[in-house]
Image: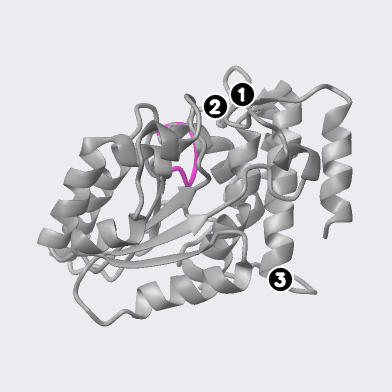
């Protein structure tokens, strides 16, 4: 488990709020972005980085680290916020988000960003990369885990299901997939673009240990992450997280279109205030 030295240790809920704040401040730099996803995924990222993952902030390429693979390249702002909070990325770089020569491009690039394990872009490839990494780690005798965050929209991709089938075939019990189910993608509601229910039963049919939780409930997430790691059967594990886009900022939660948000200049401070008032 990873903790940061502090005179008063922060709770996971406080970490999640701070991750949301980092994301809003980065979004303010550009005036737009995938803010809804970052706010919605903040709780699962807080539990990942401050409860589950074993890593060294000062050495992002430490060989014995647990790997966190971001399959959803446009969620980069969400992961940057977590890496900023974890101390992997210096806070001073937050203001460079999306700028020329920045280590924080708007879509994830492993070659640019400390702690960014894989490059995003075309969706549906992260789980396949995670399967390969898990095979490699097993052959090296490593005890490290691979966590792979993917989206409900990526369930449209055949490559995701090929990877899911491969993971169970190879009995990859060092793999934990995390699915952010916010029911939003570029073309509309994910469930209407290509239905994915019954999602738990589908993953179980592919040979996975599957759990479904409220992805904005810290206690439920902690229990699910612990259960995934402690599951005794030799099989991959998946945590299906139902999240709310814009979570923590009420006027963003109620926006009709939240896949890519443009926020008026005066609304950023309102969003930050709303976040603080909700703590």
Q: CA distance from mark 3 to mark 1?
A: 30 Å
Mark 1, Cα crowd under 10 Å, few <14 / some 14-19 / many 20+, is: some
Of callouts 1 and 2, which one flags the residue occurring earlier in the amino acid sequence?
A: 1
Q: Nearer the viewer, mark 3 or mark 1?
A: 3
Q: Secondary structure at mark 3?
A: loop
The structure residue drawn at horizontal position 48% and vertical position 69%, both measured from the top left corner, is: 52
Span colored in magenta:
111-116
Residues at circles 1 and 2 in contact by the CB criterion of under 8 Å: yes
Image coords of residue 256 (percent x, y): 66, 31
Say above or below: 41 vs 98. below
Q: Nearer the viewer, mark 2 or mark 3?
A: 3
> Which quadrant of the view contains residue 77?
top right
Q: Nearer the viewer, residue 53 or 13?
A: 13
The structure residue drawn at horizontal position 43% and vertical position 40%, both measured from the top left corner, is: 191
Image coords of residue 94 (percent x, y): 69, 36
Image coords of residue 101 (percent x, y): 57, 20
Q: Secondary structure at mark 2?
A: loop
Of callouts 2 and 3, which one flags the residue occurring earlier in the amino acid sequence?
A: 3
Is 68 covered by the magenta stretch? Answer: no
Of callouts 3 and 1, which one flags the residue occurring earlier in the amino acid sequence?
A: 3
The structure residue drawn at horizontal position 17% and vertical position 44%, both measured from the top left corner, is: 162
> Which quadrant of the view contains residue 97?
top right
Is 113 covered by the magenta stretch? Answer: yes
Say above or below: 91 vs 47. above
Q: Which mark is residue 23?
A: none
Residue with the mark numbered 2: 105
Residue with the mark numbered 3: 11
Magenta highlight: main SS: loop
Mark 3, Cα crowd under 10 Å, few <14 / some 14-19 / many 20+, is: few
Image coords of residue 217 (percent x, y): 62, 66
Residue with the mark numbered 1: 98
């Amino acid at each position: 488990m990873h903790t940061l030295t502090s005179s008063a240790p922060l709770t996971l809920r406080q970490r999640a709020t701070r991750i949301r704040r980092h994301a809003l401040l980065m979004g303010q730099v550009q005036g737009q972005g995938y803010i809804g996803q970052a706010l919605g995924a903040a709780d699962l990222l807080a539990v990942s980085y401050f409860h589950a993952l074993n890593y060294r902030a000062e050495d992002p390429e430490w060989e014995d680290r647990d790997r966190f693979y971001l399959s959803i390249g446009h969620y980069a702002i969400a992961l940057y916020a977590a890496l900023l909070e974890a101390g992997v990325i210096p806070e001073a770089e937050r203001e460079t988000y999306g700028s020329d020569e920045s280590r924080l491009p708007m879509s994830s690039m492993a070659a640019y960003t400390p702690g960014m394990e894989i490059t995003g872009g075309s969706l549906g490839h992260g789980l396949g990369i995670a399967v390969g990494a898990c095979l490699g780690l097993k052959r090296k005798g490593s005890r490290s885990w691979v966590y792979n965050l993917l989206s409900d929209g990526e369930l449209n991709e055949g490559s995701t299901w090929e990877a899911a089938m491969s993971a169970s075939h190879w009995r990859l019990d060092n793999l934990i997939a995390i699915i952010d189910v916010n029911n939003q993608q570029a073309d509309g509601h994910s469930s209407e673009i290509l239905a994915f229910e019954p999602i738990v039963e589908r993953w179980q049919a592919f040979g996975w240990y599957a759990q479904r939780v409220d992805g904005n409930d810290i206690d439920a997430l902690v229990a699910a992450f612990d259960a995934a790691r402690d599951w005794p059967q030799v099989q991959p594990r998946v945590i299906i997280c139902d999240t709310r886009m814009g979570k923590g900022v009420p006027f963003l939660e109620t926006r009709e279109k939240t896949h890519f948000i443009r926020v008026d200049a005066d609304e950023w401070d309102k969003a930050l205030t709303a976040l603080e008032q909700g703590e």
